[in-house]
Amino acid sequence: MAHADGGEAGDDILAMRGITKTFPGVNALQDVNLTVRRGEIHAICGENGAGKSTLMKVLSGVYPHGSYQGDISFDGEPCRFAGIGDSEARGIVIIHQELALCPQLSIAENIFLGNEQTSGRRRFFGKGLVDWNRTNHEAARLLERVGLPENPVTPIADLGVGKQQLVEIAKALSKRVRLLILDEPTAALNDEDSAHLLDLVRGLRDEGITAVIISHKLNEVLAIADRVSILRDGRMIGTLDPSAEDVTEDRIISGMVGRDLEHRFPPREPAVGEEVLRVEDWTVHSPTQHDRVVVAGAGLTLRRGEIVGLAGLMGAGRTELAMSLFGRSYGTGISGRLYKDGREIQARSVREAIRHGIAYATEDRKRYGLNLIEDIKRNVSAAGLPRLARRGFVDGNEEYRVAEGYRREMNIKAPDVARETGKLSGGNQQKVVLSKWIFTDPDVLILDEPTRGIDVGAKFEIYTIINRLADEGKAILLISSELPELIGMCDRVYTMAAGRITGEVARADATQERLMHLMTKDKEGERVP
Amino acid sequence: MSRTAPTNATGGGANAAGGPAGSGKGTGGRLRKGNGPAGADTLADTATGTAANGRSLTRLSVNVRQSGIYVAFALIVVLFTVLTGGDLLQPQNISNIIVQNSYILILAIGMILVIISGHIDLSVGSVVGVTGAVAAWLMVNHDVSWPLALLLTLVAGAAIGAWQGYWIAYFGIPSFIVTLAGMLLFRALTLTVLGNQGIGPFPEQIRTLSNGFTSGYLGNIGLGVLGGADLFSLLAGIAAVAGLATAQWRARAARIGYQQSVDPLPVFLLKIVAAAALIMAVTVQLARFKNLPWVLVLLAALVLGYTVLTGRAVFGRRIYAVGGNLQAAVLSGVKVKSVVFWIFVNMGVLSALAGVIFAGRLNQAGPTAGNSFELDAIAAAFIGGAAVQGGVGKVVGAITGGLIMGVINNGMSLIGAPSERVMLVKGIVLLAAVAFDVWTKRRAGSPVLR
């Protein structure tokens, strides 16, 4: 791969050198170099957790100068941003995947939020009053520029996501943007809106606005990007220049996944039994946009003693599928059939799902998995409390005994089970969440990113626990963004893209490239790996 | 902490803080070495080793957040005892403090549940007003027998709680708004029922419940220099102490049986003796005055019942789960809506009970009955250690918080302080209590906003 570091320095609008950013226990970025040329569209590709968003947060000042190592220079001048305001003052504007608009305010108010257009004329109030005529007039001008034929006084809530994305760009333009960063701009858009957005970004480039675009959609990347940088595990793998060399999706994919398989996985002899859970034609709509399909006609099968993987990139609908199966805890307009041990079941609430022997350990343990102000034992018993109760009263000693048993079995590192879960490390918190669900004695365990944010040693322990659960005859659905983990742990892997199951790969056939192809596959387009 | 859990010899640096390592033997293998691929187990958090190794361990658990309140209460009592030249602890005055604050304490019990679940109830004052009016309307205007009228009033309170609980839990309106509306609605209803005038007098039994004392069933007994005292009251106090000690002892024995950590025996005994001394001191003073107030008997029963409910019942545990992390509770199969609904039904019933007692105490149901009681009840809960974000709180804490306010009220009026100064002090105490809570949490390193 051609490294574009150095060289043509005069043409570079941005140079990030030697960026290293660490979080407790994790090296999010290691010695990353990135140069962006003036007036180009520069794509950044990488797996979930490769460090793309972290790099952009360093650039935009979300992580202030001093919280990372390395230098940033923009337009030849060194940058030491203390916050996002500083980077915006220099013309660097980031548009996040989750749009930051106030739904109840108008388009014009949103565009000028924090940058209100005031009238300098009235002496008495000085600049304290908003000049609405100017605000709306300027907003209309910006909307024309981004090709959005809407009245500036329309509330944001009345717009679709595609149009909201354009409002974000108009907002960026109002700040005299020179470097526009788009984080997964088309993830939530349909094809038409995506095409319009990409055209707009091209148009802005021709006006001289440089763009950095983070995307999982490789076909879009190839269609729009002048150059492509690839991040993997917090390191910059290299920068590809499609005009100088032949860049294909395969080439990008091999850069994204081609890490050494240094992780080791505990060995296991799979003893796969009969079918436990079957899902047919499962469709889920977004709870906020009722017409948006999040999971489309998905189907899968889990068997006793089997570990089945579910692979997919951000926004593919994996968590949404899992949570909708778990007592419809996500989504609206859910349709499809669910079979447990061959019989069709209804799991309309979490309680029903638990009763049917389904458990779901969340990907976000702090928000959805644990009561952080309570101790270990009360978290372990949270889902299976009735098991510890007689006539409505909990046997506290029995609860202690159970929790203490899990503490030892799972090797939860805490002096005793009366320790607050909020004070445990990520790996130990994850073990508490697993204990909680194992205590409900499920037949099916859905584990959503069980090793996210966990150090290598604790990961191995989690893998061992997962293997043991499978050996006990439980069916495991393992959702993970780490392909080696799926390949190392699973007997079969389903892939998802854009809400659909795009493939099913047996362990013997599973390679990272094969999975990544299926994960980046267009809706219907078949691709031969 | 003078004695912490004995720690493993293989632990890391944190072991240095460990106390006498008397029982920390024989578990050297607990730290699993070389288990992960890179032997990465030796993280900082393994350092806090453990010794749940077959021997029961004793440990002095000091929870600043929970116990600070009792220390504060003791200091305030001492302060006002000195300022009033001992009048604060006179037999009649102790009786007054209990009787005058009984309805606030009853409300505080309900309020602490509401606050633990992460909600608030601003309507309890008005509900006290309207239920007192209903009771008066039934007993005085319609001559309904007092037990039936009391029952109907409690049912009315439950209905009011169900009304508010429906809007909060099932319709999804914030409790602040629903109960703010309730504050107006039920005050309006009070005025409607009463026709803007007081109704009384109440039957004697209700007045006795609110204001009266147990009669001296067993006669008096001489206590030397303390003079005569009611024997029944003393025996009741001794029975309470004996019950408390037995229950605590059995709980401790059971915990040891399960190899849980418990207080060291001397500390345990000291706590029991302190509690016993407190109970007996209050009992003796009350016995010297006019026996036990009936509301004290009622309150003791409520405190006991609700302590068991919050500490041991599945329902009580759900309240903490809902307040601690709503989403996690939902995803653990807790019927969150139903839990919240019943918390408000319970609040309605306790408000009705407080309403009857307050009306009985004044011997009439008045249009302004219960005004601003909600503020006292909320303040009691927060002073008593409830967390602003929910998920934390104890019934005994709320009672202590209510008593702190009661002692301040009473003590300051004994020394002749004007009411504006009482208000000032109460406001400062409330702010200080919550500031302390926020401060200890921040010091513990967890973010204030979650």
Image (cartoon, rainbow, N blue to C red):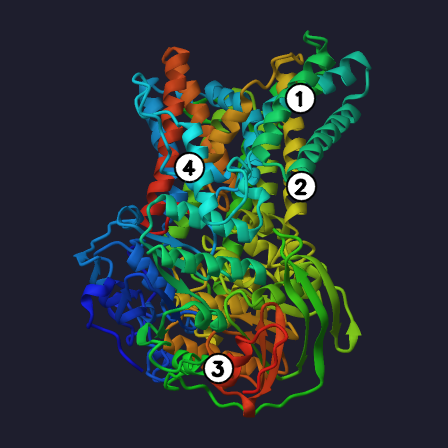
Pair 1/4: label in front: 4
Give coordinates of residue A234: x percent, y percent. Answer: 33, 72
Q: Nearer the viewer, mark 3 or mark 4?
A: 4
Name the side, left or right, on which A350 lies relative to A187: right
Residue A136 is situated, as x and y percent measured from the top left of the image, at 46, 34
Q: Position of residue A203 (x, y in %)?
A: 42, 57
**Looking at the image, is B342 positioned above or below residue A527?**
above
The residue that disc 1 covers is B185
Alpha-carbon distance for marks 2 and 1?
19 Å
Which amino acid, mark 2? Answer: Phe
Residue type at tag 1: Leu
Other residues around mark 3 within 10 Å, as few (<14) / some (14–19) / many (≥20)? some
Front in this rendered view, residue A325 or A414: A325
Question: Can residue B228 be seen here?
Answer: no
The answer to whether marks 1 and 4 sit on the same chain is no
The disc numbered 2 marks a residue on which chain?
A: B
Local packing at callout 4 (Cα closer than 10 Å; few below 14, some 14-19, many 20+) is some
- Which residue does the numbered mark 3 point to in the structure image? A464
Write down the quadrant of residue B432 in the picture: top left
Helix, strand or loop for disc 1 = helix
Left or right, B264 with respect to B289, comes to left
